[in-house]
Image: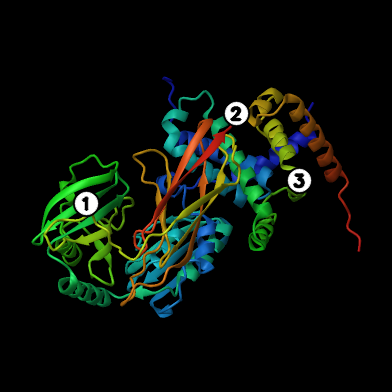
């Protein structure tokens, strides 16, 4: 005998099924690929933090970035946004723009600028995602942008500062960050030539000689990017002029091909000509603390765990946050901002907080360790910290 | 290794609409259902080689999707006022054959009861299998099903009238 309630439930489900044509699998594959780094990222909380001014920004040059929802069909709840960016978006605006593109339901379908001058076409699916993205991108509009001629002038000024104040004999510590095995290297430079490189830490097992680069070599990379590199962005030390951070992107349409050099220590040679342990930045150290709060310390397999991570320190800049790492070959996700330092004396240290929400799921039951690492590599006050969150994942079905 | 390895495109085309149908009853609207189903497929893709060898890959996808729906529902409960407003704004039955009374009646049930109703009456799973999928006792499934059916029947047959 037919159960009328069952019949009605089945009819309702079938009616909804008949209206649910699957979205292109290609789009979901793209989201799946992004998820590897942004499984992790993406959350509403990041946009919220940006919107709330957690990065300490003052909106400037509002007229240089415009956004326009271009096409949309309400019944499908899909809207294509065209984001027009004139000039290069400075940090943390670039990171904030990227965070918007990593929100759930957001699928970049054209060339992504990630803060570089150009036009990005971004398709957003789902009405709540559309409103969230719209709000997120509206908050980005107005962040400071940098024009290419200003970038050239800044590089020239930094090089002049380096040539005036820098030394020909020095040691510096280079941190190589990428979606690949990473590491930190001490490079010794004598008479302007990089003469030795030693790996200090990291999983990178390849020959460290690749990083036998002088500061002048790094300037050459910025000023005349090698073939195959589409974009180089750099920030400079206010005192010595050397680049403190260089972001290199090979293919603007590819993800995870970017790599970054960060100089985390610099020491001129002593008068006796001996290379000293690098101690830059010389203005002090800072204690960084990481606090990770999971929504559920004992989730079941397949459950989404929301982890709120709060990094606090006492410095002149936001700290960087890296995590979580799935295994040794996974560099995890990096957040933080590294604005160009101000001229003159080092800025005073003050409390800094970086908040980020990670969303994690686990495929297997048992004890899982998720590592978060924070550092202040672009601050005058150096410090780092690591926090390992232990989750006891319960068996699912 | 299974010799009857599933083709991902065929699996996706067959399972996605079915999943959206079930999730619509669970979440209360088709937009949420599609987003949750897509999120579940996003989780499936990097694991497909392994899941394709499972006896019932659809059960894996369904379990993940239901959990995502539950997470989403929990988040919505504690979300900011703005998000709550968004969610309520989506709660609109369309002029396209949606059983608005049923959707409304389902939305008043606890999520656990909704899950069991969908798994039993729409997916057609026996009580033991539902208990296994949800990780609860068979008695719990029976009790949720009984209460859910009773509440649904009551609401659908005698709609609550509002008085000023």
Q: Which quadrant, please, contains the N terminus of chain A?
A: top right
Q: How far separated are the C-alphas under marks 1 and 3?
A: 68 Å
Q: Dot 3 corresponds to which residue?
A: B102
Q: Are marks 1 and 2 in contact (CB under 8 Å)?
A: no
Residue receiving disc 1: A186
| Res A278 label | none
Q: Callout 3: helix, strand or loop?
A: helix
Q: Are marks 2 and 3 on the same chain?
A: no
Q: CA distance from mark 1 to mark 2?
A: 50 Å
Estimate how packed mark 3 is, as few (under 14), some (14 to 19) or many (20 or more) residues with alpha carbons within 10 Å.
some
Q: Is residue A256 above or below residue B82?
A: above
Q: Position of residue B96 (x, y in %)?
A: 66, 52
> Viewer-proximal residue, A3 or A305?
A305
Query: Which quarter of the figure has residue B143?
Result: top right
Vertical placement of residue B134 versus A199, above or below: above
Q: Residue furthest front?
A: A272
* Residue under numbered circle 2: A397
The residue positioned 24% from the left and 57% from the top of the image is A278
Kindly report which numbered mark, 1 or 2, lies closer to the viewer in this rendering.
1
Same chain shared by disc 1 and disc 3: no
- State left or right for residue A193 relative to residue A340: left
Q: Nearer the viewer, mark 2 or mark 3?
A: 2
When the figure is inspected, residue A279 is found, relative to residue A395, above or below; the finding is: below
Picture quarter with the C terminus of chain A: top right
Judged from this view, the residue extending furthest toward the right is B163
Q: Is residue A221 left or right of residue A354?
A: left
Decide which of tag 1 and tag 2 comes sooner along the chain. Answer: 1
Q: Position of residue B129 (x, y in %)?
A: 66, 25
- Marks 2 and 3, Cα distance to the nearest angstrom? 29 Å
| Front-lying residue, B125 or A100 | A100
Q: Is residue A279 above or below residue A350?
A: above
Chain at numbered mark 3: B
């Amino acid at each position: 005998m037919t159960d009328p309630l069952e019949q009605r439930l089945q009819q309702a489900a079938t009616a909804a099924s008949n209206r649910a044509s699957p979205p292109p699998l290609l789009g979901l594959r793209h989201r799946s690929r992004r998820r590897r780094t942004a499984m992790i990222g993406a959350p509403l909380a990041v946009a919220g933090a940006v919107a709330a001014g957690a990065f300490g920004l003052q909106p400037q040059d509002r007229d240089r970035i415009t956004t326009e929802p271009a096409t949309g069909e309400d019944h499908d709840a899909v809207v294509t946004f065209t984001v027009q960016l004139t000039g290069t978006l400075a940090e943390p605006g670039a990171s904030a723009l990227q965070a918007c593109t990593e929100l759930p339901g957001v699928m970049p379908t054209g060339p992504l600028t990630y803060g570089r001058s150009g036009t990005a076409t971004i398709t957003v699916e789902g009405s709540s995602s559309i409103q969230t993205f719209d709000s997120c991108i509206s908050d980005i509009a107005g962040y400071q942008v940098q024009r290419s001629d200003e970038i050239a002038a800044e590089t020239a000024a930094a090089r002049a500062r380096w040539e005036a104040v820098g030394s020909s004999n020095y040691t510096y510590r280079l941190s190589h960050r990428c979606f690949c095995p990473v590491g930190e290297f001490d490079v010794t430079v004598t008479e302007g030539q990089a003469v030795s490189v030693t790996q200090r830490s990291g999983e990178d097992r390849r020959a460290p000689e690749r990083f036998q680069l002088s500061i002048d070599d790094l300037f050459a990379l910025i000023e005349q990017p090698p073939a195959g590199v589409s974009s180089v962005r750099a920030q400079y030390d206010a005192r010595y002029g050397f680049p403190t951070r260089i972001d290199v992107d090979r293919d603007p349409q590819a993800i995870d091909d970017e790599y970054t050099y960060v100089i985390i220590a610099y020491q001129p040679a002593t008068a006796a000509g001996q290379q000293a342990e690098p101690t830059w930045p010389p203005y002090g150290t800072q204690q960084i603390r990481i606090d990770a709060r999971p929504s559920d310390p004992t989730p079941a397999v397949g459950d989404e765990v929301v982890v709120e991570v709060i990094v606090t320190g006492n410095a002149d800049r936001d700290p960087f946050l890296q995590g979580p790492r799935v295994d040794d070959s996974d560099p995890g996700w990096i957040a933080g901002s590294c604005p160009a330092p101000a001229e003159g004396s080092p800025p005073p240290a003050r409390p800094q907080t970086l908040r980020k929400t990670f969303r994690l799921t686990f495929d297997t039951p048992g004890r899982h360790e998720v590592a978060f690492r924070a550092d202040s590599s672009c601050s005058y006050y150096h410090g780092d910290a690591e926090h390992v969150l232990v989750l006891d994942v319960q068996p699912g079905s | 290794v299974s010799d009857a390895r599933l083709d991902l495109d065929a699996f996706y085309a067959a399972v996605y609409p079915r999943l959206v149908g079930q999730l619509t009853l669970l979440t209360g609207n088709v937009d949420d259902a599609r987003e949750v189903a897509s999120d579940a497929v996003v989780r499936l893709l990097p694991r497909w080689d392994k899941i394709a060898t499972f006896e019932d890959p659809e059960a894996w996808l369904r379990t993940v999707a239901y959990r995502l729906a539950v997470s989403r529902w929990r988040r919505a409960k504690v979300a900011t006022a703005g998000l709550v407003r968004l969610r309520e704004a989506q709660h609109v039955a369309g002029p396209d054959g949606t059983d608005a009374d049923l959707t409304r009646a389902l939305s008043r049930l606890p999520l656990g009861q909704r899950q069991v109703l969908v798994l039993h009456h729409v997916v057609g799973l026996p009580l033991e299998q539902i208990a296994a999928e949800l990780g609860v006792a068979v008695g719990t499934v029976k009790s949720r099903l009984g209460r859910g059916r009773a509440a649904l029947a009551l609401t659908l047959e005698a709609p609550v009238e509002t008085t000023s």
